[in-house]
């Protein structure tokens, strides 16, 4: 075991033994938190309402195809590996991560392709093909992103902001990066070509953020990708979840499936335990929720004074859009289609305004295409291919349509676009397909307004302004996941799990 692993292991053995904690929900944030708590000697039980662990990282097996619900982009694998290192184990013994290259291929309606690769010279050549004069601007942007990465991710990503003072103390280091500007606006100061501006700003969309309004802090994602690479777990994201579960149970942790939590039980300003739909109930010294934050306060703390105040505050927040996802399996293979593609439409600003502001279901699209069988052919039957395509759509507060009726229509619309751009005979090749809508996110994950990302990542909804990692009133109630600091995405929720774990271990020690 490395010296780093030893020091982390010792740190996490300071908590008093025989303390008990419950984690509601088994998404990446919940599992990362549970592993940290169990590693520290806190007996931890994870309670999951669905029949499989993973939360949003659910999966289906249909007609020999494996379909991950998502997320599908693994960055900063070291933040995951640290969960094993805490107890001297090696993540590679439980899961194999496969490198993905290019990270993304970006495609526009005029036929332009741009391969986002991690080779510095090759990437500069790609930029020069589109706009030679923007090469130097990109180099300056990379330095800007590197600085943000150090200040915003390395130093602050695992720091809980429990009071306004803690956020103010962190502000001076960040202000030189102009976080009050949007990602798109900041990128535009470095490069002038519109396609390159889209290349350097679209990443926030994968975390629920509008590049036109999301804080420029999220430009750190570019350095995060360059530093750690982009990876895909052998067997799919679901196998990474399975590896985390295996490791958690190896440490003595317990997972309960298919039994939704119906109540966080309290006495005064303390959480006393949880009660589930089956009637199962148990007392715990601390409770952490990886569930949707609105669901946690409004439903799991229903009829309690804290619930009313917190719910009222959450209703005033702005929420990220939802997603419409089509999973499909095709006859044949496509070596020319990389693992990740962004298919940009004829509009960018106008499309984002439709989705985020006016609540219009656009006729044109910005699509993310996931093609896992190019990296792992075992995700489909021999000679076949597995795909999913994702389109951001307004959440149900802005577009309260009946997706049961609209779903089949919109699925065909999106598949038609994939056919037009990439696979002309796509409809003839479909072996199986199904879609997942905002209503499904609401039903399966209790996602408020059908938004899987929770609150929109605006500057005024980040750090201290976001749901805190520890509740302000119920002193042993904690939060982890996309709705709390630092936000959505695997690195975000895993970093947030460290922040929450540190609080819990100190409080329970």
Image (tube, rainbow, N blue to C red):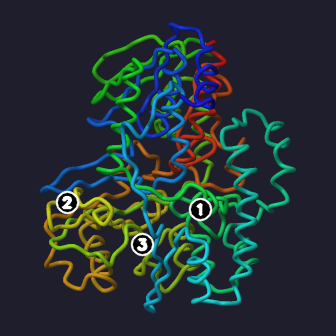
Label 1 close to label 2 by CB (< 8 Å):
no
Mark drawn on residue 380: 2
Mark drawn on residue 41: none
The alpha-carbon separation of the residues under discs 1 and 2 comes to 29 Å
Measured as percent of width and height from the top left, residue 364 is found at 42, 81
Mark nearer the viewer, 1 or 2: 1
Of the residues under marks 1 and 3, which one precedes in the sequence? Answer: 1
Up/down of 423 relative to 499, above or below: below
- Residue located at (38% from left, 41% from top): 55
Q: Nearer the viewer, residue 119 or 102?
A: 119
- Residue located at (37% from left, 22% from top): 250
Of the residues under marks 2 and 3, which one precedes in the sequence? Answer: 3
Q: Nearer the viewer, residue 21 or 392?
A: 21
Q: Quadrant of residue 257?
A: top left
The answer to whether 175 appears left or right of 375 in the picture is: right
The alpha-carbon separation of the residues under discs 2 and 3 comes to 19 Å
Secondary structure found at label 1: helix
Q: Residues within 10 Å of mark 1 (few under 14, many from 20)?
A: some
Measured as percent of width and height from the top left, residue 56 is found at 39, 46
Measured as percent of width and height from the top left, residue 344 is found at 47, 79
Q: Quadrant of the C terminus?
A: top right
Q: Residues within 10 Å of mark 3 (few under 14, many from 20)?
A: many
Mark nearer the viewer, 1 or 3: 1
Secondary structure found at label 3: strand
Q: Quadrant of residue 425?
A: bottom left
- Residue located at (77% from left, 34% from top): 163
Mark drawn on residue 341: 3
The answer to whether 408 appears left or right of 215 in the picture is: left
Q: Nearer the viewer, residue 149 or 424?
A: 149
Q: Residues within 10 Å of mark 2 (few under 14, many from 20)?
A: many
Residue wearing tag 1: 226
């Amino acid at each position: 075991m490395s010296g780093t692993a030893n020091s982390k292991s010792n740190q996490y053995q300071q908590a008093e033994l025989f303390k008990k904690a419950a984690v509601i929900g088994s998404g990446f944030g919940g599992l990362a938190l549970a592993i940290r708590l169990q590693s520290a000697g806190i007996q931890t039980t994870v309670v999951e309402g669905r029949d499989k662990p993973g939360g949003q990282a659910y999966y289906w097996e249909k007609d020999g195809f494996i379909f991950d619900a998502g997320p599908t982009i693994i960055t900063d694998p070291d933040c995951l590996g640290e969960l094993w290192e805490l107890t001297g184990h090696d993540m590679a013994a439980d899961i194999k991560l496969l490198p993905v290259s290019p990270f993304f291929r970006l495609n526009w309606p005029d036929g332009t392709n741009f391969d986002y690769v991690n080779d510095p010279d090759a990437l500069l050549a790609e930029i020069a093909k589109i706009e030679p004069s923007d090469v130097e601007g990109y180099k300056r942007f990379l330095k800007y992103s590197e600085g943000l990465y150090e200040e915003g991710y390395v130093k602050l990503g695992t720091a809980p902001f429990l009071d306004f003072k803690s956020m103010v103390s962190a502000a001076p280091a960040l202000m030189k990066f102009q976080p009050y500007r949007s990602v798109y606006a900041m990128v535009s100061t470095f490069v002038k070509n519109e396609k390159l501006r889209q290349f350097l700003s679209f990443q926030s969309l994968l975390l629920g953020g509008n590049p036109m309004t999301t804080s420029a802090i999220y430009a750190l994602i570019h350095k995060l990708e360059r530093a750690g690479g982009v990876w895909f777990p052998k067997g799919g994201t679901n196998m990474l979840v399975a590896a985390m579960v295996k490791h958690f149970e190896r440490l003595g942790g317990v997972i309960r499936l298919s039994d939704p939590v119906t109540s966080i039980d309290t006495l005064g300003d303390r959480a006393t335990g949880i009660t589930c739909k089956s009637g199962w109930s148990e007392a715990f010294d601390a409770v952490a929720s990886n569930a949707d934050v609105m669901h946690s306060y409004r439903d799991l703390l229903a009829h309690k004074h804290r619930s009313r105040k917190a719910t009222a505050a959450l209703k005033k927040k702005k929420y990220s859009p939802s997603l419409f996802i089509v999973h499909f399996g095709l006859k044949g293979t496509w070596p020319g289609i990389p693992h990740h593609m962004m298919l940009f439409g004829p509009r960018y600003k106008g499309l984002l305004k439709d989705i985020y502001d006016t609540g219009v279901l656009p006729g044109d699209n910005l699509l993310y295409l996931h093609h896992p069988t190019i990296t792992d052919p075992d995700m489909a039957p021999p000679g076949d291919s597995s795909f999913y395509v994702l389109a951001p759509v307004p959440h149900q507060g802005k577009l309260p349509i009946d997706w049961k009726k609209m779903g089949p229509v919109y699925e065909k619309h999106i598949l038609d676009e994939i056919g037009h751009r990439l696979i002309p005979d796509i409809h003839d090749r479909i072996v199986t397909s199904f879609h997942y809508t905002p209503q499904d996110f609401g039903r399966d994950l209790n996602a408020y307004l059908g938004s899987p990302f929770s609150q929109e990542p605006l500057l005024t909804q980040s750090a201290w302004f976001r749901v805190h990692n520890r509740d302000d009133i119920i002193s042993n109630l904690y939060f982890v996941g996309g709705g709390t600091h630092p936000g959505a995405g695997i690195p975000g929720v895993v970093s947030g799990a460290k922040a929450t774990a540190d609080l819990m271990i100190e409080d329970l020690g």
